[in-house]
Image (tube, helix red, strand yellow):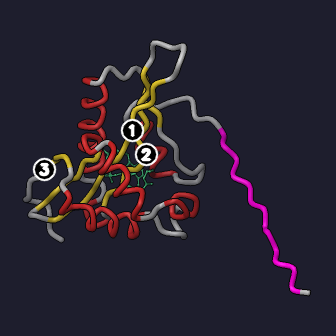
């Protein structure tokens, strides 16, 4: 993919983009690079959000190809005047990495959240996902908090 001289368009996703988003997510959220993220990435993540909050599902397009996406939601909490935004998934095709696609997607997502009156944005990623942590720090995120995943094997009784 040669995108050096191509322009990057950020737009809300249409139904025709859903398969591209899903397959790009499969490429980006691999068990090697992001085991926890990979574990929860499935087609329902894309279709559910498209059904419920399509305005928060963005794609980056270059020469007719989807090279990145951002998906999020808003959270209203009782007994607080604050609205929260959660960027659930952000993925950029490695072939289009480090040219500002993620940044453009995030900036558009942030603008939409600001228009909705969101006061605080949240993201989460794996502790060893250094590129993503550096990316989010470059976008102004701070105060990383540990979150522990635990597993429990449920073995079948073979007797
Ligand atoms: C994290 C991710 C979205 C960044 O997308 P991107 O389009 O490559 O990022 P950008 O080109 O907009 O980079 C913006 C800034 O983020 C930082 N950054 C991005 N990737 C980086 C990397 N691999 N190493 C160090 N810093 C990085 C830099 O500060 C960069 O600015 P610079 O290029 O001027 O130095 C992309 O690497 C990705 O899809 N990763 C896999 C999925 C993932 O982990 N998503 C986040 C959790 S859901």
Q: Residue 24 falls in which quadrant of the image?
A: bottom left
Q: CA distance from mark 2 to mark 3?
A: 21 Å
> Which element type, helix, strand or loop, lies under badge 1?
strand
**Residues at discs 2 and 1 in contact (Cβ within 8 Å):** yes
User: For mark 1, what is the residue?
Assistant: 73
Quarter of the figure that contains the C terminus: bottom right
Of 29 and 75, the residue lying toward us: 75
In the shown orientation, is residue 26 left or right of residue 109? right
User: For mark 3, what is the residue?
Assistant: 9
Label count reads 3
User: For mark 2, what is the residue?
Assistant: 88
The secondary structure making up most of the magenta span is: loop
Determine if the C-beta at disc 3 is less than 8 A from ligand 1: no
Q: Does residue 57 lie above or below 5 as drawn? A: above
| Mark 2 or mark 1, earlier in chain | 1
* Residue at figure coordinates x 10%, y 64% from the top left: 64
In the shown orientation, is residue 96 left or right of residue 76? left
**Residues at discs 1 and 3 in contact (Cβ within 8 Å):** no
């Amino acid at each position: 993919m040669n995108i050096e001289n191509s322009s990057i368009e950020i737009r809300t996703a249409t139904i025709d983009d859903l398969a591209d988003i899903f397959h790009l997510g499969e490429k980006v959220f691999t068990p090697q690079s992001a085991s926890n993220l990979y574990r929860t990435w499935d087609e329902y993540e894309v279709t559910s959000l498209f059904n419920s909050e399509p305005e928060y599902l963005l794609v980056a397009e270059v020469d007719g190809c989807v090279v990145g996406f951002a998906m999020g939601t808003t959270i209203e909490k009782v007994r607080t005047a604050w609205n929260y935004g959660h960027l659930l998934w952000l993925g950029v095709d490695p072939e289009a990495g480090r040219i500002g696609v993620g940044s453009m997607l995030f900036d558009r997502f942030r603008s939409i959240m600001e228009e909705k009156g969101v006061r605080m944005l949240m993201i989460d990623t794996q502790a060893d996902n250094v590129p993503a942590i550096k990316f989010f720090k470059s976008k102004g995120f701070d105060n990383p908090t540990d979150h522990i995943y635990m597993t429990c094997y449920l073995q079948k009784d073979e007797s």
